[in-house]
Amino acid sequence: MNWWYIFKREVKQMFIKDPKRVLYLFGACAIYILLFGLLYGPHVISSVPIAIYDEDHTSLSRSLIQSFNDSERYQIIAYANSREELEYLLQEKQALATITIPLDFSRNIKTGHSMPVLVDVNGTNLIISNSVLSSAQEIIQSLSSAVATKKLEATGQLPEQALHRVAPVTLGLRISYNSTLSYLDFFVLGLAMAALQQGIFLSVGASMIYEYQNQQDLQEIPIPQIIAGKLLPYWLFGTLSFVMALALSTLAFQIPFKGAFTSLLALGTVFSFTATALASVMATLCRDEVSFTQLSLAYTVPAFIFSGYTWPKHSMDTLSTAISSTFPLTYFADTLRDLMLTGHAPALQHNILILLLLGTTLLIISALLYKAKRKSLSIDLHHAP
Amino acid sequence: MGLKDIIKYECSYMFRENPKLAIILLGLPILYSLLFGLAYNGNIVKNIPTLIYDQDQSSASFAFIRSFADSERYNIVAQVTSQEIMEETLHHGDAILAVVIPPNFSQDIKLGRSSQVLITINSANLMFSNAILGSVQEIVQTVSAGIGQKSLEGLSQLPSQALSGVSPIRLAVRVLHNPTFSYSNFMLVGLGANGLQIAIMIAICTILAREFSNLSPWRNTSPLTFIMGKLLPYWLCSMVSFIISLYITIALFQVPFRGDIGSLLLIGSTFTFTIITVGLFYSAIAPTTVYAVQLPMLYIMPSYLFSGYSWPTLAMNDFSRTFSAFLPITYAADSIRDILLAGYSPSLLTNIAILLIFSLVFLSLSILIFSLRRKKLLQSLNPEVSL
């Protein structure tokens, strides 16, 4: 009996004896891609319900309303007749933003005053308030320039000259890598990788705990052989699951695939290795599969939040950064997105190295723990009547 | 055996026999609140590494750069001298955005030609791009209006007249409830609710599953009494967790609390009760305790993101909206945030009613399934007992 025997035994176990292991390994991350691919399918927020209170009723105010109406970002759900009605709509969340055009708006502008357009946004959901803020700025700005240009033209300036005077500095914006600011491209990969990690955890956990509960099976075999034979299949299939996840996200949801396949494969392979080793350590610390599952479920969300995948590491304080650096996902998810979207991840080598070190350390710890646990379990066994 | 005995039995189980349950239920949500509060302690994305490529080197361009230097949102990490270095630095991730001021910037403006400032953003992480987009427009607009005003003053207009000449329409934005765009105000409540439901689920899912192997002491107790007795201690504990973790969020991480405690407790208790009945249901249907803890995962893990709490319902397609409608957290997290930030949740009563319907359905299903399984098990045990 050697590691190859255990390897074959393990593959048989995961596919036939306890097929939920292979299901977790491949299913968790595929389901996540499908679910969140569908959730973030619209890519960006559009049709935010807004209400308008036009106190002015002039052609200028109407053209302002028209520009909001033309924008896909907004959907005008009501024209209010009073301030109270507007506030009511906002308070009841029937409208998430309101636009007030003040009395004498048009007349004051004609007589050379600057007039505000009042936009009230419900700020509770940042995704909505961010989206409203930047698009409202754009709409108002372009209308303002148009009006200013017209007024200067009336004083006898050439149209082009007038435009330059009112907008001497313009903004050229180049948004690289995720130019439509799509949430799908931003979010789905990382969520899928959190699920991949979970799948690896649950299957490796089930496998290791089975061994602790059936000590007699492999009693005579040296520990390095056991660990190698048992963990290798999960490492390999975990990597395969990673590759399939990338294929699925690119083919089904058109997530850009810009990085070199070899870099992606290298990253996925070491992550799968580290996650396997971590799961093996965690399994040794747990009494049974129920406790292991509870631990790994509790682990998932903080690991994702602290990974820097959404809230950037850059904005974390020292303590949070320290916590963040203990999760393997931190060295993986953000780097993977960089590779996929930009084709280049500055921290790639650095992160691969850290994952490799982390994984190797965890593997050694898990072998030592296995040894200790085997000893204590065999003592129990001998003492049993 | 009455309700009291079962409550006593369950309490002694969760606190003495298997204290891990009490630790999960009381400890995990609190730990989550502390951890996530810590993660988002920065509140807004600040000091974004910024690159300047000033091809003009004039006083006008310096003034423009200063407006970036003055904003705490940006942190100028380098001034570069060529397009290649700029691209390279961006590519290497040493800067998230680059500001390019074209040659003849100041001259073009003086001569009445407009000049374009080019801003490149690395948008791989939307957190950065969202933070940049809002403020960059404002900065450029302010600078532009200032210069435009001067130029019109040159045409012998009065300063105020000149300003309204260049920007006749202003945007006055009032962001209600979260004016600083604070990330912890936005996220913590929902993550807390999610942490609570994870804790409840992983603690409670074994509650019935473990009884199937040990039915005899309770064989004469009605399923309703039995289940209620088991459920009440968990409900009480999860309410304690709910209150403590909210308190941490408010007191320690300065999330505003503008609503009233009554509504908060009402929605909190309905939500925790619903999650407990969902956990019971899983526990009743699961073939083994391992499945009882693994099955709910399918349900809990995606539920937070589908709840409409961050990605809003209005942007969901039919599939997501339907899925979302079947998740209890959909009716709780957003309402709790509304109560905290806005002081009022318009859909509070509807949401509570829906949650109550959910919990009634899951409770009756659990009781039904439990009593059927118990009957079957006792029947199969009976021959042995009579021997």
Image (cartoon, coloured by chain):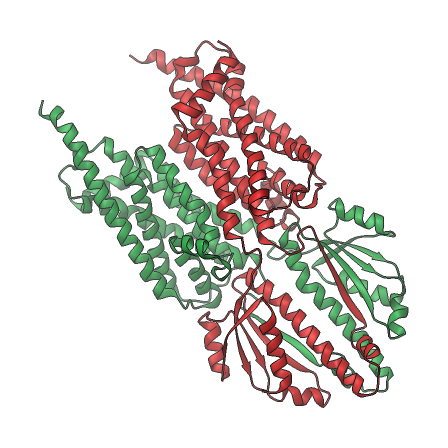
Q: Which residue is drawn at 59% across and 56% down?
A: B43
Q: Where is residue A385 in the image (x, y as percent from the top left)?
A: 28, 12
Q: Position of residue B69 (x, y in %)?
A: 77, 60
Q: Which residue is drawn at 43% across and 52% down?
A: B193
Relative to A183, residue B163 above or below: below
Q: Quadrant of residue A15?
A: top left
Q: Residue at x 31, y 32 (%)?
A: B288
Q: Quadrant of residue B207?
A: top left
Colour in which chain A is drawn: red
Relative to A272, residue B188 above or below: below
Q: Which residue lies furthest to the left in this view?
A: B386
Q: In which quarter of the image is residue B270?
A: bottom left
A180 lies left or right of B375 = right
Q: Looking at the picture, tell me which residue is in the foreground, B254 or A360.
A: A360
Q: Position of residue B24 (x, y in %)?
A: 40, 41
Q: Looking at the picture, tell me which residue is in the foreground, B110 or B259.
A: B110
Q: Where is residue B99 in the image (x, y as percent from the top left)?
A: 78, 58
Q: Looking at the picture, tell me which residue is in the foreground, A275 or B315.
A: B315
Q: Which residue lies furthest to the front in this view?
A: A251
Residue A263 visible (yes or no): yes
B179 lies left or right of B79 = left
Colour in which chain B is drawn: green
